Image: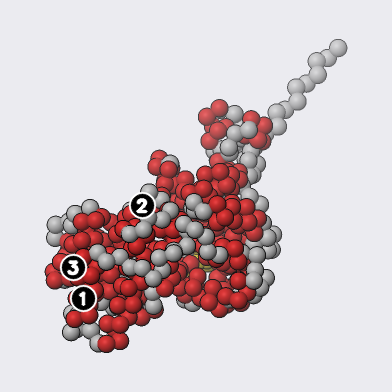
Amino acid sequence: MPATPKQPRRPHVKSRSGCQNCKKRKVKCGEERPSCRNCSRRGDLCDLSDETIVPNALEVPSTVASTASALSGSHTPQVLSRAPSFVDDGNGMGALTVLDLELLHHYTTSTCPTLSSDPIIRNWLLVNVPQLGFSHSYVLYSVLALAASHLAHFRPNSRQYYYAEATARHTIATSIAAPILSAISTDNLIPMYSFSILTLFISFASLGHENDLLFDASNVIPGWFTLFRGVRTVLEFNERAIRSSSISFLFSKRPGVNMPHESKQLDHDALKEFQEYIVTSTSEDEHTRQKLLDAFQDLKVAFYPFYGEELSNEGKVRSIFTWLYRISDEYIDMLRQGNSNALCILAFFSVLLHRLEYNWWLKGWSTHLIDRIYAALDHTHRCWIRWPIQEIGWVPQRDVSQSLFHITTPTT
């Protein structure tokens, strides 16, 4: 019986773009996405799930810096170079990757408990906010971005990777949320407020990444100053709706959280001496002097939980948030213009940040601010911030006047 001729082998195209797991095991990778068949069968995390699927020249705002400008009414588009591989379903919501599931898990188990010690606020961040994200994608992307920022702080070997993932997700969140800011209604008020709060945490947590984007043109004012303007705008224009909404409990007074000392101020010698200097300063007109005094008086109230009556971490955090919320637009304009007295007040505020740096999202801000403020001040005003420098434990660099962060300070 004649032998059956051998069938020719089917040709196949060789590829060098398989996932790393298949390459290590020296097996053929099917390159299925978001996870190849081999990795899915073995339960491995496939690196194909993190590849970028973004149209060329997709214009969306940059991350924290553009969020600040969006909340304040300005917008500067920037080309996104990296983004998570979401598949848009027409509502801003896409298919989540394995990494996104890891980030969501990390947020609920690890990140959320670090954001607040108040059980009521912590439960809102843990349950209500992610739930909002399932119907408002910009909230969900912000949750994932904050979790990635948290991992960046505690996984130093992968820090830049997680910062990039955080940036990509928050950029998408901002691009979706920015148009809604001009049309806030009862339907999107709570999601927009949640997005704003998450963005504040992301802004604080971004110090280790893209430092140049964290400050405005003055090189002294952090991006979260402008973000607080946006939160204040949302609250002030919708105060009645929020007070009668499902999140009204967030604004109720609770012992150890709200400040029972609202009429009390810290009478520390360094604070009293600088306040007297502002009062007697002949370089300021009366209106400017009063705005400086208003900002400093509010700051003395914020100091009280730290040096006077000890409150919980939640009460202390709320005290600095309250000061950032209450400062006037005129005071911020003085900072932008390089007013020396305004910069000195910001240096005193840096002391409170230093006392809260056991919170991972505030770590490093006090020294970062005092370094820029010191470089912007003349020798006379540097003498007025000696106490903040001592409290923070910061040591000026030599030739600081030649620092990259130096700005010309007008004579005051």
Q: Is residue 75 visible?
A: no
* Residue 62 coordinates in the image, percent (x, y): 47, 64
Coloring basis for residues: secondary structure
What's the CA distance linking mark 2 and mark 1? 30 Å
Disc 2 crowd rating (10 Å Cα; few below 14, some 14-19, many 20+) is some
Quote the CA–CA distance across marks 2 and 3. Answer: 23 Å
Camera-side mark, 2 or 1: 1
Q: Which residue is mark 2?
A: 357
Q: Residues within 10 Å of mark 3 (few under 14, many from 20)?
A: many
Name the front one of labels 1 and 3. Answer: 1
Among the two numbered marks 2 and 1 on one chain, the one whose residue lies closer to the N terminus = 1
Looking at the picture, which amino acid does disc 1 mark? Answer: Glu
Q: What x and y, as percent, mark residue 19?
A: 56, 38
Disc sitting over residue 384 in the figure: 3
Viewed as shown, does residue 323 lie left or right of 126? left
Label 3 sits on a secondary structure element that is: helix
Residue at (31% x, 72% y) in the render? 296
Q: Residue at x 55, y 65 (%)?
A: 251
* Image quadrant in which you'd find residue 155: top left
Closer to the camera in the image, 363 or 207: 363
Q: Nearer the viewer, residue 341 or 205?
A: 341
Give the image quarter of residue 69: bottom left
Q: Residue at x 32, y 73 (%)?
A: 297
As drawn, the residue found furthest toward the bottom would be 286
Quadrant where the image shows the N terminus: top right
Q: Is residue 198 above or below residue 165?
A: below
Name the amino acid, label 3: Trp
The percent position of residue 343, horizontal first and vertical second, equals: 26, 71
Find disc 1 in the rendering and name its residue: 276
User: Which mark is drawn over residue 218?
Assistant: none
